[in-house]
Image (tube, grey):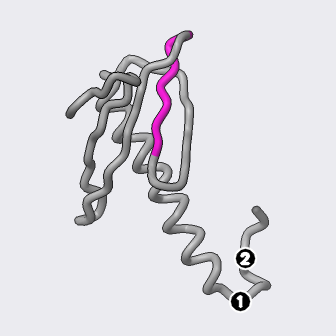
């Protein structure tokens, strides 16, 4: 993982056999911010190392995208409200 001058650290994470990439940085107040191509999520930094927590946050963002893709193909009566 490489850190740039803005404090962003690039990382990759394999989820269900697919490789995803993102960037994370630590923020004041024990928070961790994770970026993907189209999403941003900020969480309080827990007991895990920043890189491990960033992988977990990325997995949640990927799961949200996967659910959205499935939801969009469902009949409207079966869709969960956003």
Measure how far apart labels 1 and 2 are at the Cα level: 7 Å
Please tell me which residue is depicted at 40% across the width and 33% down the height of the picture.
24
Please tell me which residue is depicted at 30% across the width and 27% down the height of the picture.
4
Where 36 sits versus 67, above or below?
above
Reading the image, the residue beneath label 1 is 75
> Magenta: predominant secondary structure element?
strand
Residue 77, given in percent of the width and then of the height, sits at: 79, 84
Residue 15, given in percent of the width and then of the height, sits at: 30, 57
Where 80 sits versus 24, above or below?
below
Mark number, residue 79: 2
In the picture provided, is 42 more to the left or to the right than 62? Answer: right
Residue 27, given in percent of the width and then of the height, sits at: 50, 18
The magenta segment: 29-35
> Badge 1 local density, few (<14 within 10 Å), some, or many (20+)?
few
Evaluate if marks 1 and 2 touch, with contact meaning CB atoms under 8 Å apart: yes
Where 8 sits versus 20, above or below?
above
- Residue 31 is inside the magenta segment: yes
Report the quarter where the N terminus lies: top left
Residue 38, given in percent of the width and then of the height, sits at: 53, 55
Q: Residue furthest bottom?
A: 75
Q: Nearest the camera: 24 or 67?
A: 24
Q: What secondary structure is found at the residue carrying circle 1?
A: loop
Q: Nearest the camera: 5 or 56?
A: 5
């Amino acid at each position: 993982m490489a850190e740039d001058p803005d404090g962003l650290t690039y990382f990759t994470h394999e989820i269900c056999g697919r490789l995803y990439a993102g960037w994370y940085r630590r923020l004041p107040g024990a928070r961790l911010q994770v970026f993907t191509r189209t999403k941003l999520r900020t969480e309080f930094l827990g007991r895990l190392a920043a890189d491990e927590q960033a992988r977990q946050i990325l997995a949640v963002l990927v799961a949200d995208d996967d659910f959205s893709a499935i939801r969009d193909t469902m009949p409207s009566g079966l869709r969960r409200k956003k």
